[in-house]
Amino acid sequence: MNAQTITEQEIQHLTPADVAALAQRLEQDDYPNAFASLQDWHLLRKIAFQRPDIVEPYLHLLDWEAFDEA
């Protein structure tokens, strides 16, 4: 799965097990380079916008923070 190529329909068909596997990769942080981990992070973020119910246990991986741009 790639965040840039996954469609909204594909996101709707993801299972909690799919998201758990993605989160496990992120938690282990065993990637050949930083760009590979960033792709998984963007994918989890994209899924979170479409299916927050299955990403909820892994929100700590996304570092959601409110920013004050003022």
Image (cartoon, grey):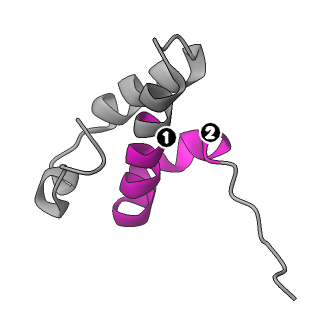
Q: Secondary structure at mark 1?
A: helix
Q: Residues within 10 Å of mark 2 (few under 14, many from 20)?
A: some
- Nearer to the camera, 32 or 52: 32
Can you tell which of label 1 and label 2 is closer to the viewer?
A: 1
Q: Residue at x 19, y 56 (%)?
A: 12
Q: Is the C terminus in the top left, top right, bottom left or bottom right quadrant?
A: bottom right
**Mark 2 and mark 1 in contact (Cβ < 8 Å)?**
yes
Query: In the rendered image of this protein, does residue 9 appear above or below residue 32?
Result: below
In the rendered view, tell whether residue 38 sits above or below residue 20: below
Q: Which mark is residue 41?
A: 1
Give 36 or 47, whichever is nearer the viewer: 36
Residue 28, picture quadrant: top right
Q: First in sequence: mark 1 or mark 2? A: 1
Judged left or right of residue 29, residue 23 is left
Residue 4 in the image, given as x and y percentages of width and height:
26, 51
Q: Is residue 38 magenta?
A: no
- Residue 17 lies, in percent from the top left, at 31, 29
Q: Please tell me which residue lies in front, 41 or 33.
A: 33
Determine the residue positioned at 36% across, 59% down. Answer: 51
Which segment did they paint magenta? Answer: 40-62
Q: Which amino acid lies under the numbered mark 2 shown in the image of this protein? A: Leu
Which image quadrant: the N terminus? top left
Mark 1 nearby-residue class (10 Å; few <14, some 14–19, many ≥20): some
Q: Position of residue 57 (x, y in %)?
A: 56, 41
Question: Distance from label 1 to label 2 (Cα)?
Answer: 8 Å
Q: Position of residue 48 (x, y in %)?
A: 44, 56
Helix, strand or loop at label 2? It is helix
The label on residue 61 is 2
Magenta-colored segment: predominant secondary structure: helix
Is residue 61 shown left or right of residue 15? Answer: right
Answer whether residue 49 is magenta in the image. yes
Residue at horizontal 46 percent and vertical 11 percent from the top: 32
